[in-house]
Each structure stands twice: as C-alpha cells, then as structure tokens.
Image: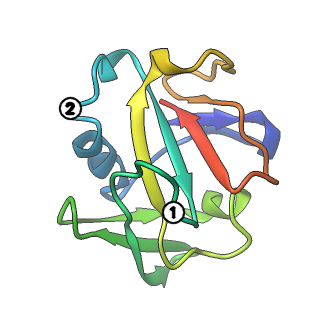
Amino acid sequence: MFDDSRVGLNKEPFVSDADTMIDVLVADTPSAQQGFRLLFSATPFPSYTVKPEWQREEYSGNWYFSSQLKMEGWLCSALFNYFDKAPKVIYVKAEPKARFTKRQAVGRYQVVGSSLADQQNSLSI
C-alpha cells in the first residue's frame, strides 16, 4: 500500500493483480525489496519499460493489460488523483530507489517529487 498526503491517500493498496504486475515489473530491479521508484505517465517518456493499455471500467476503477508482462491488473479510483480521466495507455518504469533523493516516507510505499501538474508522476515503493 502507499500514502500520498498531497492527494489525501492513506494506506491505499494495489489490489486485483496490479500488485502482482508491480512485483513482476521490479523482479530485476536492484534492491527492490528495500524499495523502488515507480514512474508513470499518460505520455511516453525515455526508457519506459511497460505500457499497460486500458481494457475496461469496472467498479469505479479501470483494468489495464500489459502485453510486455502478459498480465492484467485493476487500478482503483485513486488513479484519478493523478489523471483527469483513465489514460488509454500508462507508460511505466521502475528504477532503484537510490537514483533519487527527494522522498516523503509513507510506510512501504513512498511518493516522490511529483505534482499533479507534472506529466510524469512517481511513487517510491
């Protein structure tokens, strides 16, 4: 789970296979068990690694399928704290936590130096 006090989220979990997708995504990320940074954007950015595509809406959340991971996961309505509407594609990259320094501790997950005005968001997990 993660917290982001900037948008009023507290102990927000990744569920319905979104957590499993993240685990697979970070499998080769050095020291991922100690945390990592998850970058995500509705527009492509250099070195993104996966791009889950929107499939359908369900229970105020949205299902995304990653052909790279061959997995589907559900993102709850917390998605709308970062995007005005569910993006057709979310470009994602995980990187080691050591590559950044500005952090806001939030339990297992950390939100890192993003603003709602940014096109690219990040969570430190």
Indicate the position of residue 107 as horizontal and vertical percent values: 56, 21
Which residue is rendered at x = 28% and y = 28% of the image?
A: 29
Mark 2 residue type: Asp
Which is in the foreground here, disc 2 or disc 1? 1
User: What separation in Å lies between label 2 and label 1 (alpha carbons)?
Assistant: 22 Å
Indicate the position of residue 60 as horizontal and vertical percent values: 58, 75
Q: Where is residue 26, by image quadrant? A: top left
Residue 67 located left or right of residue 15:
left
Earlier in the chain: of badge 2 and badge 1, it is 2
Marker count (numbered) = 2
Residue matched to label 2: 28
Secondary element at tag 1: loop
Other-residue count near label 2 (Cα within 10 Å), few / some / many at <14 / 14–19 / ≥20: few
Indicate the position of residue 72 as horizontal and vertical percent values: 28, 67
Which residue is rendered at x = 40% and y = 31% of the image?
A: 95
In the rendered view, would you say 58 is above or below 71?
A: below
Q: Are marks 2 and 1 in contact (CB under 8 Å)?
A: no
In front here: 120 or 124? 120
Q: Where is residue 110, by image quadrant? A: top right
Secondary element at tag 2: loop
Residue furthest out toward the front: 46
Residue 68 located left or right of residue 59:
left
In the rendered view, would you say 22 is above or below 52?
A: above
Other-residue count near label 1 (Cα within 10 Å), few / some / many at <14 / 14–19 / ≥20: some
Mark number displayed over residue 44: 1
Mark number displayed over residue 71: none
Indicate the position of residue 67 as horizontal and vertical percent values: 23, 70
Mark 1 residue type: Pro
